[in-house]
Image: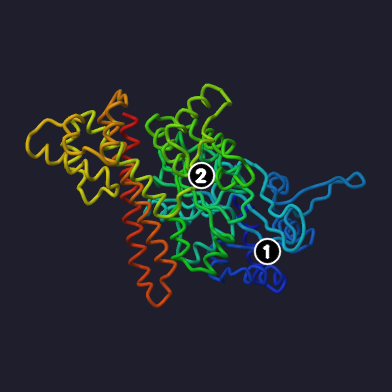
């Protein structure tokens, strides 16, 4: 069976280089595939004849019963006799290799109009499309070196990325990732980035892949190109801008929430909130849920306490959500970011005031210059002075320094707010890491914009920005992994 596949691949490959394969060769070269890539991936062409491969296999005395099993040929009964004919006709042929670099099947892309657009070999003793990834035989060592796999949607996308020097790229065979494929990749990397075309119809189906990854020790990320498919995007924008999109990929929860909000046109705020809650409900750990409820309140410009109460109603199955008390104006740009940071820093101050044993950590982990919220900063400074002087720290003591203004109002709120936290140290770690992750994301976004401007006169050297993005991304990975491990423990 393997020998038959080798014979077929060689015959198709010879055809694409011959006069008989002119149409296929012209199509593939116009798409941007180079002659070198045609050879590296052993691309071929199946002409429109019904017996192009069949006649060749018969001339080599190949067992046609095995060719039928492999799906190299098909058969039908006509006038009481069995007729054998080519399965792939007028198609670009993509040999599919296993990890041992053996050809186990084929994919065929129609030239011109016709259905199906892509045709794969049928399941056989050699070929199981749910366990194979196109391009893996070439990409494996690069995935292992970079500890990251980029998963695209099509054969040509894989080849285009490899041509551009991005060689840790693979594609499933026309389906969403399966458990077998995810487990295969996880043996070589700790991060899988699902990269979708701008107008991909497969996003919804592929979201199932994200659920599979929860059970495998690998971090899932998702990115969507702003236009076109990976091959066309690289040809138009270049490798660096393409990698900037990959490096800014989102974790699955952020991606799903963004999809809910992006599809909110014409929906009222409560319907959007229910969609966001449906995503947050599936988060396993309470600390992570809490973080996303905070984030949802910022994104939707709703009061955080209202959002948390509504989420409880949602979990209880009640439909009377109350978060229509949204702020009339949604903050944008710096205002929105400041709002998130201000909330986080005020949560930090409240936690430290209720649990003074955390003050030492706060003095080590934060400085006055870190805190962007003026109210939190003022109170933090006074807490630091009391700590340095060896004096007891309490909300009552802080009232001596703040007799009016926003600081006093915040202290009043803290004084009457119940604070019953099962693990104050864990809550502190959550605030600290979430703030760090948020700031890292801001920096990554900044450098991505610099990459896009790199061709302008004042844009600077994009290599420097890409290096910064990679450093930040690794730092983000370490923090995320730390939170994950702490939750597992």
Q: Position of residue 161 (x, y in %)?
A: 51, 62
Image x and y of residue 289, in percent:
42, 33
Q: Kindly identify which numbered label has been placed on residue 162.
A: none
Q: Position of residue 253 (x, y in %)?
A: 47, 40
Rendered-image quadrant of the C terminus: top left
Q: Is 264 positioned to the left or the right of 290 in the image? A: right
Q: Earlier in the sequence, mark 2 or mark 1?
A: 1
The residue located at (29%, 31%) in the rendering is: 414
On residue 45, which mark appears?
Answer: 1
Q: As rendered, which of 297 and 434 lies closer to the eye? A: 297
Classify mark 1: residues with Cα within 10 Å, few (<14), some (14-19) or many (20+): many
50 horizontally vs 164: left or right: right
| Residue denoted by label 2 | 328
Q: Is residue 421 visible in the rendered structure shown here?
A: no
- Depth order, front residue of 427/128: 427
Residue that appears at 18% across and 37% down: 361
Asked whether residue 176 is in view, the answer is yes
Position of 330 with respect to 175 (left or right) is left
| Position of 308 relative to 70 (above/below) | above
The residue under the point 68% across, 53% down is 118
- Under circle 2, the secondary element is loop
């Amino acid at each position: 069976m393997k020998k038959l596949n080798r014979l077929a691949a060689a015959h198709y490959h010879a055809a694409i280089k011959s006069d008989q394969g002119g149409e296929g060769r012209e199509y593939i070269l116009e798409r941007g595939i180079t002659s070198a890539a045609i050879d590296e991936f052993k691309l071929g062409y199946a002409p429109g004849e019904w017996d192009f491969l069949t006649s060749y296999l018969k001339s080599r005395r190949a067992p046609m019963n095995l060719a039928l099993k492999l799906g190299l040929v098909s058969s039908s009964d006509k006038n009481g006799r069995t007729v054998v004919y080519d399965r792939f006709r007028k198609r670009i042929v993509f040999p599919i290799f296993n990890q041992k670099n053996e050809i186990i099947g084929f994919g065929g892309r129609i030239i011109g109009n016709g259905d199906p657009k892509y045709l794969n070999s049928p399941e056989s003793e050699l070929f199981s499309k749910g366990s194979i990834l196109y391009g893996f035989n070439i990409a494996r060592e690069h995935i292992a070196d970079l500890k990251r796999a980029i998963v695209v949607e099509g054969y040509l996308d894989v080849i285009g990325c490899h041509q551009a020097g991005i060689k840790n790229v693979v594609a499933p065979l026309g389906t969403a990732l399966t458990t077998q494929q995810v487990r295969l990749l996880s043996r070589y990397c700790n991060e899988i980035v699902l990269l979708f075309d701008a107008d991909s119809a497969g996003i919804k189906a592929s979201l199932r892949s994200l659920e599979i990854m929860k059970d495998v020790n690998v971090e899932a990320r998702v990115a969507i190109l702003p236009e076109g498919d990976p091959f066309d995007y690289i040809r138009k924008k270049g490798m660096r801008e393409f990698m900037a999109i990959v490096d800014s990929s989102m974790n699955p929860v952020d991606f799903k929430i963004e999809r809910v909000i992006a599809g909110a046109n014409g929906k009222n705020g409560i319907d959007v909130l229910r969609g966001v809650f449906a995503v947050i409900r599936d988060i396993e750990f309470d600390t992570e849920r809490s973080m996303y409820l905070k984030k949802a309140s910022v994104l939707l410009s709703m009061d955080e306490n209202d959002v948390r109460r509504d989420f409880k109603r949602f979990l209880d199955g009640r439909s009377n959500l109350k978060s229509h008390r949204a702020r009339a104006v949604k903050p944008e740009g710096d205002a929105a970011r400041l709002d998130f940071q201000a909330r986080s820093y005020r949560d930090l101050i409240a936690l430290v005031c209720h649990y003074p044993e955390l003050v030492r950590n706060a003095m080590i982990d934060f400085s006055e210059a870190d805190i962007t919220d003026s109210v939190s900063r003022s109170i933090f400074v006074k807490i630091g002075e009391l700590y340095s002087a060896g004096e007891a720290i309490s909300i009552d003591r802080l009232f001596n320094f703040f007799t009016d203004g926003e600081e006093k109002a915040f202290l009043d709120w803290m004084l009457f707010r119940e604070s019953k936290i099962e693990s104050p140290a864990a809550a502190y770690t959550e605030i600290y890491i979430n703030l760090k992750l948020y700031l890292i994301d801001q920096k990554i976004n900044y450098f991505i914009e610099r990459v896009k401007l790199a061709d302008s006169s004042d844009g600077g050297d994009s290599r420097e920005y890409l290096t910064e993005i990679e450093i930040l991304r690794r730092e983000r990975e370490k923090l995320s992994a730390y939170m994950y491990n702490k939750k597992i423990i």
